[in-house]
Image: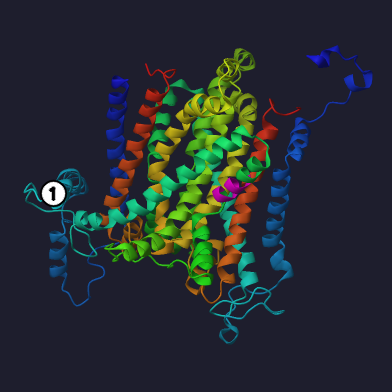
């Protein structure tokens, strides 16, 4: 198992590097230039100096390795130093965002908490809704509950989040006026009232994501339960005289959870990238919003960095899913 | 087992040979959701294809005096903030959205099938191609799509013209980010198929690899390909609408469902219909296609068929 993990890790790191190189080279071909938006009255020499100061004078590969060094070493240390107050931040240049001229790492530190809250809660609630629905649907296959559950999950799976989000805004903030339609990120939770406000404003984005995730996970859960319910060991458990509750919730559920857990792990990065849309609907200024804005104004260092983070997340969680599968299911042996 | 015990009815035994697609259709018919999906999908196709011939209104026709109108006989679904007819826009927008779905699905399918067959059939190519597939699966797809469109939209629009350039860019971008599942499924099936006796027989009489693949292997992987094709249409339509919704799809004068939804978002408090109609059409299309995919999967599975 350990050697398998190490082998996977040995493949994962080059994968991330290749992806970052692809994105870097793609963005390098882009027509966008950080000096493009400056006033035309600036003389050419000064313009060239600005380009030099942003580190655009070197050849592509030199710039790539510089960026990689800053991304993997300088920025994490700066972020760590900012969080802990330790004096470990190295000297030297950092990745600068072209639109704000401030280090990318500092902007991301401000953006990540919102995304984590919205995406994390959305995923958590999605799982909490999906598991019981999947279990009951499979146990009572073809009952009205199963029919309704399958239909609703098909709808939740087919209706894109940008439409559910807009419909939620229409119903709950325009017609009923229960929740605000825009997310106020400057809001600080101090007392009970401000907490209620925070809960209200996070409710809709979380609900949109939870609905979408729940419909996907409940389909997996149902299929996985159905696979296991007809197995011999279930008949054995019943023949031993175990109660129906023990059979389903202990024997079948535990075995059915194996593929579902890996699906949940693989889904985490997709939820991050999918949340770009949800953040855009509710104007949450998270990571996805930062990416979209950076793309609008051709702020390539920012785009590069966020894409790299997403790539790391995907590779990491794929690795976790594979390893988890091996740990959870003793029948699986990676040689 | 009980079938064998039945006395053989000569009429049944000598029934004329029947195309196997009729069996598939018979099974497909029993799936109620799939039938309903097919009906809805066909009517949406008719709406976008035949609709503009009956409702001959130019979707780009501005009429500032008639802006923000509610439903009336002249404008069945009302007009937008520039006085353009919403019904006509939905019809033309649907043409583009559905066309993107079909073309992107087809391109993705061709890439996926090609890579899947190559990886499954030729041992030498298997490892590199599957590593490539893994690499693509690890790409952050939505951000990458956004970058692709943002980077190449202007260049392509200049060389090929506004509509054609963006259309092919979006189709190509969706295809290049969605072929991986097809490739994996096809590779798995081809790996199993190439060990079959009839492939061995074909090879032993000297059939070239290309013909073995087109004649003996591909027809047998058709069913998983068809299922992933239907799912591909659905995801391509969603992706295109999401791009348009994020403002990185077609230019503003090309109405697509996602674009109309995106523009209606700012007017949601006063005119909710402008958001609901395009959203409803996208959702119905995707839902119907997904149901068709479900039905096809059951119908094409010989273990389920005939039961």
Q: Quadrant of the C terminus of chain A?
A: top left
Q: Is residue B209 above or below residue B156?
A: above
| A74 horizontally vs A335: left or right | left
Instruction: Determine if residue B135 is in view.
Output: yes
Q: Is residue A18 above or below residue B236?
A: above
Q: Nearer the viewer, residue B254 or A210?
A: A210
Residue on which disc 1 sits: A84
Residue A167 point in image, percent of width and height: 53, 63
| A119 horizontally vs A164: left or right | left
Q: Residue most toward the bottom?
A: B65
Q: Residue at x 82, y 29 (%)?
A: B18
Q: Residue at x 69, y 74 (%)?
A: B76
Q: Quadrant of the N terminus of chain A?
A: top left
Task: Say which chain tag 1 marks.
Answer: A
Residue A102 point in image, percent of width and height: 18, 61
Q: Which residues are magenta?
A: A151-157
In which quadrant of the rendered view does residue B53 lie? Answer: bottom right
In which quadrant of the rendered view does residue A262 lie? Answer: top left
């Amino acid at each position: 198992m350990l050697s398998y993990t190490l082998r996977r890790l040995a493949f994962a790191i080059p994968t991330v590097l290749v992806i970052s190189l692809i994105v870097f080279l793609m963005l390098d071909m882009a027509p966008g230039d950080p000096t493009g938006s400056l006033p035309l009255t600036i003389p050419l020499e000064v313009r060239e100096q600005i380009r030099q100061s942003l580190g655009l004078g070197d050849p592509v590969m030199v710039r790539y390795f510089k960026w990689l060094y800053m991304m993997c070493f300088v920025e994490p240390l700066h972020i760590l130093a900012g969080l802990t107050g330790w004096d470990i931040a190295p000297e030297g240049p950092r990745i600068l965002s072209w639109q704000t001229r401030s280090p990318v790492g500092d902007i991301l530190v401000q953006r990540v908490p919102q995304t984590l809250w919205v995406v994390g809660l959305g995923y958590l609630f999605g799982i909490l809704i999906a598991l019981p629905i999947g279990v009951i649907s499979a146990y009572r296959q073809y009952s009205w509950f199963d029919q309704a559950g399958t239909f609703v999950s098909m709808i939740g799976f087919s209706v894109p989040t940008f439409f559910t989000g807009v419909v939620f805004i229409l119903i709950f903030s325009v017609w009923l006026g229960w929740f605000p339609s825009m997310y106020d990120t400057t809001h600080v939770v101090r007392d009970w009232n401000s907490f209620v406000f925070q809960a209200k404003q996070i409710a809709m984005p979380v609900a949109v994501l939870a609905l979408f995730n729940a419909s996907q996970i409940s389909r997996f859960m149902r299929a996985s339960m159905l696979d296991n319910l007809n197995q011999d060991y279930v008949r054995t458990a019943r023949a031993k005289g175990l109660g129906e509750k023990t059979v389903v919730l202990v024997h079948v559920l535990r075995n059915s959870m194996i593929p579902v857990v890996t699906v949940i792990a693989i889904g985490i990065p997709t939820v991050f990238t999918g949340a770009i849309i949800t953040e855009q609907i509710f104007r949450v200024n998270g990571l996805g919003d930062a990416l979209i804005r950076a793309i609008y104004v051709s702020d390539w260092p920012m785009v590069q960095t966020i894409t790299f983070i997403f790539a790391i997340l995907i590779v990491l969680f794929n690795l976790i899913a594979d390893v988890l599968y091996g740990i959870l299911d003793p029948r699986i042996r990676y040689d | 087992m009980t079938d064998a015990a039945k006395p053989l009815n000569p009429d049944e035994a000598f029934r004329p040979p029947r195309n196997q697609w009729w069996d598939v259709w018979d099974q497909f018919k029993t799936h109620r959701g799939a039938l309903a999906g097919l009906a809805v999908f066909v009517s949406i196709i008719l709406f976008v294809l035949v609709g503009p011939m009956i409702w001959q209104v130019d979707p780009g026709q501005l009429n500032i005096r008639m802006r923000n109108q509610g439903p009336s006989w002249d404008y069945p679904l009302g007009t937008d903030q520039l006085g353009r007819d919403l019904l006509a826009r939905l019809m033309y927008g649907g043409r583009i959205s559905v066309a993107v779905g079909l073309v992107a699905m087809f391109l993705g399918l061709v890439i996926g099938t090609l890579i899947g067959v190559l990886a499954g059939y030729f041992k030498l190519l298997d490892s590199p191609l599957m590593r490539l597939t893994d690499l693509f699966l690890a790409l952050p797809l939505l951000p990458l799509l956004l970058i692709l469109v943002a980077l190449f939209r202007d260049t392509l629009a200049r060389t090929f013209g506004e509509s054609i350039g963006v259309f092919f860019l979006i189709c190509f971008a969706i295809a290049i980010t969605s072929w991986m599942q097809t490739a994996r499924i096809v590779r798995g099936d081809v790996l199993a198929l190439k060990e079959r006796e009839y492939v061995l027989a074909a090879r032993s009489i000297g059939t070239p690899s290309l013909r073995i693949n087109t004649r003996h292997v591909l027809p047998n992987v058709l069913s998983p390909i068809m299922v992933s094709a239907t799912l591909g249409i659905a995801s391509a339509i969603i992706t295109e609408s999401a791009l348009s919704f994020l403002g990185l799809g077609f230019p503003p004068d090309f109405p697509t469902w996602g674009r109309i939804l995106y523009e209606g978002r700012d007017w949601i408090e006063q005119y909710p219909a402008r958001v609901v109609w395009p959203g409803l059409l996208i959702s119905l299309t995707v839902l119907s296609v997904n149901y068709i995919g479900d039905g096809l999967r059951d119908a094409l599975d010989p273990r389920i068929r005939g039961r």
